[in-house]
């Protein structure tokens, strides 16, 4: 008998009557129906601490005169001295094959409480090392999805929209956090302007989310620049290899949203998986 799969939903909204709460509930129902054990980290209900401080460490600091959070947390993790709330979230993440980040877009980013989860939980050693990142990342056998709601309409987030290209906005989280830690990043689920949509439209959004979750196992992840494209050494400056740059010179678009190489951004690089 196959082992039960586990999913983790990291959820950040204060109101149980919110559309985000409804999206969370749909995900719990759909994944449970597929046989997943579903864990939910309801950050506001947990009163999860957003700030990364020395309180996250039990016992003495390595260098109390000059507190460097990243170094101290790695040492504490190695010694089993992380605060109980951080250790519990890491335990949930270790179990999960699938992680969903559910949140409303705040100031082109996630709520502070979710950023605090990332800062405090995804620490060096546990979530990444300089040897284990991107394609060789620690979580390369896990999948992640960003599921978010916006206050603006989809047209506002187009390349010629007032807010600019949504692909640029998504890059820091999807590449800089998730793929950096090795996750296979599935296409984001974006719910445009639900607060100003009629009830029927919100119901359709919920049903579309349920339908997508039911077929998630067949989805391909987003495409990112392979680590082999880069000279991953301090001597090479962690930059694109010359032969790769030369090969890319004839391309119409850049490689990715951020690796644009002075060319137009590849369309939908952070929102849709590439077709074969």
Image (tube, rainbow, N blue to C red):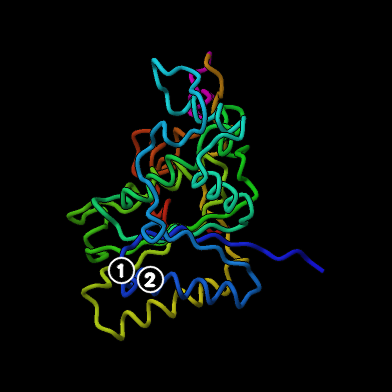
Q: Can the viewer see residue 255? A: no
Is residue 28 a member of the stretch shown in magenta?
A: no
User: Residue at point 21% right, 54% down?
Assistant: 160
Say which quadrant the C terminus sits in.
bottom right
Position of 237 relative to 38 (above/below): above
Q: Which of 106 and 155 is in front in this view?
A: 106
Q: In the visual, does 91 lie left or right of 240?
A: right
Position of 95 relative to 128 (above/below): below
User: Residue at point 38% right, 50% down?
Assistant: 114
- Label 1 vs 2, first from the N-terminus: 1
User: Residue at point 31% right, 48% down?
Assistant: 112
Residue 113 point in image, percent of width and height = 35, 50
Residue at mark 1: 15
Is residue 241 a member of the stretch shown in magenta?
A: yes
> What secondary structure is marked by label 2?
helix
Q: Are marks 1 and 2 in contact (CB under 8 Å)?
A: yes
Residue 49 point in image, percent of width and height = 37, 46
Say which quadrant the N terminus sits in.
bottom right
Residue 223 point in image, percent of width and height = 52, 49
The magenta segment is: 235-246
* Disc ID at residue 21: 2
């Amino acid at each position: 008998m196959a082992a039960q799969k586990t999913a983790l939903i990291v959820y950040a909204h204060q109101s149980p009557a919110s559309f985000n709460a409804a999206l969370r509930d749909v995900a719990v129902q759909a994944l449970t129906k597929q046989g997943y054990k579903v864990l939910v980290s309801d950050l506001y209900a947990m009163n999860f601490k957003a700030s990364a401080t020395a309180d996250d460490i039990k016992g003495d600091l390595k260098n109390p005169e000059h507190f460097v959070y990243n170094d101290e947390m790695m040492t504490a993790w190695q010694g089993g001295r992380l605060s109980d709330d951080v250790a519990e979230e890491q335990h949930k993440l270790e179990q999960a094959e699938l992680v969903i980040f559910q949140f409303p877009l705040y100031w082109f980013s996630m709520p502070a409480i979710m950023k605090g989860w990332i800062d405090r939980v995804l620490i060096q050693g546990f979530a990444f090392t300089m040897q284990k990142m991107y394609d060789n990342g620690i979580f390369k056998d896990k999948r992640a999805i960003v599921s978010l709601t916006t206050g603006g309409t989809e047209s506002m987030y187009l390349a010629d929209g007032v807010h600019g290209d949504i692909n640029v906005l998504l890059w820091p989280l999807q590449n800089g956090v998730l793929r950096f830690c090795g996750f296979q990043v599935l296409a984001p689920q974006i719910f445009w302007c639900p607060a100003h949509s009629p009830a029927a439209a919100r119901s359709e959004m919920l049903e579309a989310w349920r339908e997508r979750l039911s077929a998630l196992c067949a989805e391909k992840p987003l495409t990112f620049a392979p680590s082999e494209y880069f000279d991953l050494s301090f001597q090479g400056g962690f930059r694109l290899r010359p032969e790769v740059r030369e090969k890319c010179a004839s391309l119409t678009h850049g490689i990715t949203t951020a690796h644009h190489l002075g060319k137009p951004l590849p369309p939908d690089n952070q929102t849709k998986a590439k077709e074969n």
